[in-house]
Image (spheres, rainbow, N blue to C red):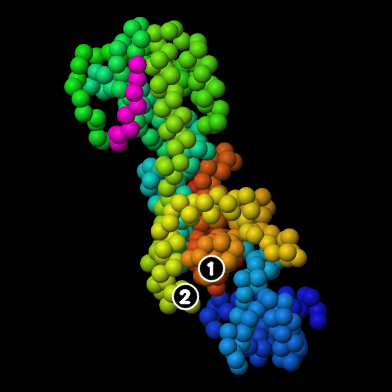
Amino acid sequence: MSEERRLAVLRAIVEDYVHTREPVGSRVLTERHGLGVSPATIRNDMAALEDAGYIAQPHTSAGRVPTDKGYRLFVDRLAEVRPLTTPQRRAIETFLSEAVDLDDVLGRAGRLIAQLTGQVAVVQYPSLRLSGLRHLELVPVGGRRLLVVVITDTGRVEQRYLDVVGRPGQGAAVTAVETDAGALPGGGCDEPVLDEGSLGELRARLNAAAAGKRLSELPAAFVRVVGDLAPDLAPLARGVADLVVDTLGAEREERIVLAGTANLARAEMRFEQGLSPVLEALEEQVVLLGLLTEMFADPRGPRSDGESETETSWGESGVGVRIGHESRLDGLTEASVVASGYGSDGDTVAFLGSIGPTRMDYPGTIASVRAVARYLSRVLPN
């Protein structure tokens, strides 16, 4: 049997099944795809593909449907990513460029992916662990409290409070108070202990030390700042530095945006095991984040012994694909995840993607995810 013809038959089966959602027979392939051989020859090719595990017969007298292994071969070797149309590209760029802040741009990115693919979109907030410090602001509040505003290079804003006891020059001590910016901690407004001169100097030194550095580099940079300051400012500087590092490194702050969940209820999104397992998997945001992070390291997923080493590479396409059981998540055994990283200045700071049935339009989904990731990278703060 011709290897090229076998691949052509598999491509035709995948494309027809994705389009019709019905098992594909040899006669249909002959009529629709002009493969240039008889139905009997195509049946022989289909039997070989079935023996190799690329297609399966769901029930007697039915046509064939792709397996996870068949979809994988299709994605790795057969799928041709369709470029978006000029109107689609312009619509994406315009829609994202109109966002007013980080929350808005990520929400818009999710809605775009869901609309373009007709599936569920997942967009990770820029990881604080992968972010750098763009600017640090110190604002005295109520005399004895300091509002520390951390602005990352991805536009994310985090706000924390420090309680300050004593005065610079008198061995000031600090205590971190983790509260939302809108909820000022309680306590009396005693005589101010923080003067603008000291805060201005501390602010300038910490910002200068953090310029162009990632989280992993900040502790050492801040240690040098504390060591160079006069003893009266050192405790306050150490407290602010520790709070900034803890804030940027806090895994509890990782979160995602989901959009298009209602798309799962559409008839064409049918799952054999029902919708509940998929919805439950989507609710496990920590698990989803772990999957996206793992895909960055190995976009193709675990390979069985003797299986081809061919894989969809993040380096080449910028998009990773996990199909069915490759995700190793019970709720997503009938689903595929197509994801890409995004970030400014060529640095990946987070991931986004689309989740739908394994019977998805892979070329269209890959193109949509890749396009939104690229445009999102462009509109992020530089």
Q: Secondary structure at mark 1?
A: loop
> Mark 1–mark 2 contact, CB under 8 Å?
yes
Percent from the top left, x then y, of residue 197? 35, 11
Residue at image coords 38%, 42%: 101
Give the Cα separation between the discs numbered 1 and 2. 9 Å
Percent from the top left, x then y, of residue 179? 30, 34
Q: Which residue is mark 2?
A: 273
Asked if residue 115 is positioned above or below residue 234 in the image, the reply reads below
Between 381 and 52, which is closer to the camera in this rendering? 52
Asked if residue 95 is positioned above or below residue 164 in the image, the reply reads below
Residue at image coords 54%, 65%: 336
The magenta segment is 173-181
Task: Please rate how many residues cluster around mark 1, counting C-alpha atoms within 10 Å: few if below 14, some from 14 to 19, many from 20.
Answer: many
- Whether residue 365 is visible: no
Q: Is residue 178 magenta?
A: yes
Q: Is residue 379 magenta?
A: no
Between 365 and 64, which is closer to the camera in this rendering? 64
Residue at image coords 44%, 23%: 241
Q: Which residue is mark 1?
A: 333
* Circle 2: residue type: Gln
